[in-house]
Image (spheres, rainbow, N blue to C red):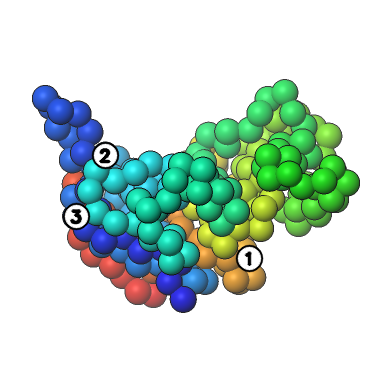
Amino acid sequence: MEVIRLEDVWKVYGTEVRVEALRGVDLSVEEGEFIAIMGPSGSGKSTLLHIMGLLDTPTRGRVFVLGREASRLSDDERALLRRESIGFVFQQYNLSPSLTALENVELPMLFAGVPPEKRRKRAVELLEAVGLGDRLHHYPNQLSGGQQQRVAIARALANNPHIILADEPTGNLDTKTGRRILEVFRELNERGKTVVIVTHDPEVAEAAEKIVKIRDGKIVGVVER
């Protein structure tokens, strides 16, 4: 089953000075795949991920997520599809500093209207699953970088999404910690989650079963592993 499809997707910024971040991208992501998107800085890989995740819209071209064409959806429908079907993990973690690890993981479920007892139980289970059962009530500034990233992964899983999109998830971590985070993504993929990771690190890309190479806004190669 195809979970994401991009057809001739362009993203252009500016009017007087035009920057073509994406130039005619075609890409298909199948359910259960583990894909790495690789490219140098400025190649368009983060822009591509944001469009795949419905955080941004293309200048032209079509984007389908779980069979639904994004351009035909209202803003509310897009937000609902994104909230229910896609989990995001970012390089900077993006945790709320005033909330504990447990509260950070509960937050997406709060927005989704999940009852307090149910969301608390699931948040505890998710944090235990990523090895942070003893850090439930710690704030982000009391956690290491690797621990914060694992909280971010648990938060991304809060609403049980079909797809996990990660933008340089090991970029701020040392090599050893980065490998541990990669193991978490591998385990998620083995459980059936579709995982797409943007990276410039060849070691991270080696963990994926497919590597999509992008340069100057164009896909220049796909390596099946």
Q: Which mark is residue 42?
A: 2
Q: Nearer the viewer, residue 150 or 193?
A: 193
Is 80 on the left-hand or right-hand side of 213? Answer: right
Residue type at the position of mark 3:
Gly
On residue 218, which mark appears?
Answer: none
> Which residue is depicted at the point 38% across and 59% down?
69
Rendered view: 144 above or below 118: above
Identify the element where label 1 is drawn.
helix
Q: Is residue 147 visible?
A: no
Residue receiving disc 1: 187
Q: Report x, y in % for residue 171.
A: 47, 41
Select label 3 or label 2 by which is in front: 3
Residue type at mark 2 is: Gly
Vertical side of 58 occupied by 209: above or below: below
Tag count:
3
The mark lying in front, picked from 3 and 1, is 3
Q: Earlier in the sequence, mark 2 or mark 1?
A: 2
Residue 200, x across and y down, in percent: 36, 48
Residue denoted by label 3: 24
* Rendered location of residue 7, percent (x, y): 26, 61
* Residue 78 horizontal side relative to residue 85, left or right: left
Dot 2 alpha-carbon crowd within 10 angstroms: few under 14, some 14 to 19, many 20 or more: few
Q: Secondary structure at mark 3?
A: strand
Tag 2 secondary structure: loop
Question: Mark 3 and mark 2: span between their CA atoms?
Answer: 16 Å
